[in-house]
Image (cartoon, grey):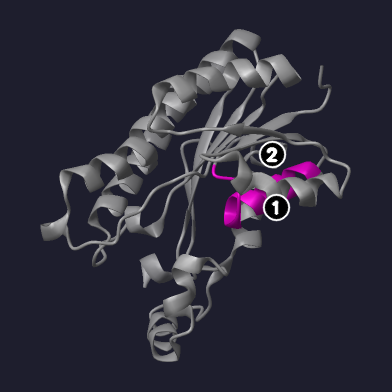
Amino acid sequence: MSHKPVALITGASYGVGAQTAIDFSNLGFDVVLTARTLDNLDAIKSALLSKHVSPLCLTLNLEDQHSIDNLTHDIDQHFHRLDVLVNNAGANVRELAIDVTEDQWDSVFNTNLKGTFFLTQAVAKYMIDKKIHGNIVNVASVHGLQGALERSTYGISKAGLIQMTKMLAIEWAQHSIRVNAVAPGRLMTDSPSRSKTSNNAEYMKAMLAKIPLHRLATVEEVSAAIVFLASASAASITGQTMVLDGGLTVS
């Protein structure tokens, strides 16, 4: 049985999810990491093991309710508690709204909203049953706050996630469960999906010109915001979305 607090991070194989796992482990948490395929967690698992942290790695497909239903049971069997949920896993499709297919829509919404809602519901039920004063942090996006080309499906789903944050915060405050979100803009990452635009100097110059601070946020900064929102220092914060976009959405 774990005597440490336990944090569950979905979509933990790279980027914000992996960094968040490292940061929680540095604070003395046991960590549960999920991905659609266990092999995708090998790198972050090795990094944590090198720091003498043994993560629990589980498969999770947010489009599969059975996968969601098994998760809290597996965590309880291993750690017997769960204190923090970070909903980081998500899906995206880059397509003009007029060309979006039903299958694309369903894939994005089943992951970003439906699956995330029912996972969060399952975790909240567990926390309430165990009388745990828990924290839930959703990873949204500035695309849920403002319009953008070729991001309609993703942006609408993230807007829903931001509203979900508010609704659940109100309902679960009575159980001392806080629910917040972070909304990053474009991040400074080495993600393969970003390589084409990251290596395009003119594209990057035009993007940075739109951002008042003329810089992109880092995964470390987003992770720090997540950890803060889940900490005792944020004990009076719930239902809020912290935006990390260099001033883009207020410019």
* Magenta stretch in the rendered image: 11-25
Would residue 20 be counted in the magenta stretch? yes
Residue 59 lies, in percent from the top left, at 56, 33
The secondary structure type at the circle numbered 1 is helix
The disc labelled 1 sits on which kind of residue? Ala
Would residue 95 be counted in the magenta stretch? no
Q: Residue at x 38, y 85 (%)?
A: 203
Q: In this view of the protein, which residue sits in the foreground, 46 or 25? A: 46
The residue pinned by badge 1 equals: 43
Q: In this view of the protein, which residue sits in the foreground, 190 or 134? A: 190
Say which quadrant the C terminus sits in: bottom left
Residue 158 lies, in percent from the top left, at 35, 47
The disc labelled 2 sits on which kind of residue? Ser
**As drawn, is 104 to the left or to the right of 218?**
left
Q: In this view of the protein, which residue sits in the foreground, 179 or 110? A: 110
Seen in the picture, residue 93 relative to 196 is either above or below; the reply is above
Q: Which residue is drawn at 83% across and 38% down?
A: 28
The answer to whether residue 69 is visible is: yes
**As drawn, is 166 to the left or to the right of 34?**
left
The residue pinned by badge 2 equals: 231
Disc 2 to disc 1, how far (Cα)? 27 Å
Category of crowding for the residue at label 1, using alpha-carbon neighbours closer than 10 angstroms: few (below 14), some (14–19), many (at least 20): few
Residue 168 lies, in percent from the top left, at 43, 27
Q: In which quarter of the image is residue 221?
A: bottom right
Which residue sits furthest left? Answer: 98
| Badge nearest the viewer, 2 or 1 | 1
Say which quadrant the N terminus sits in: top right
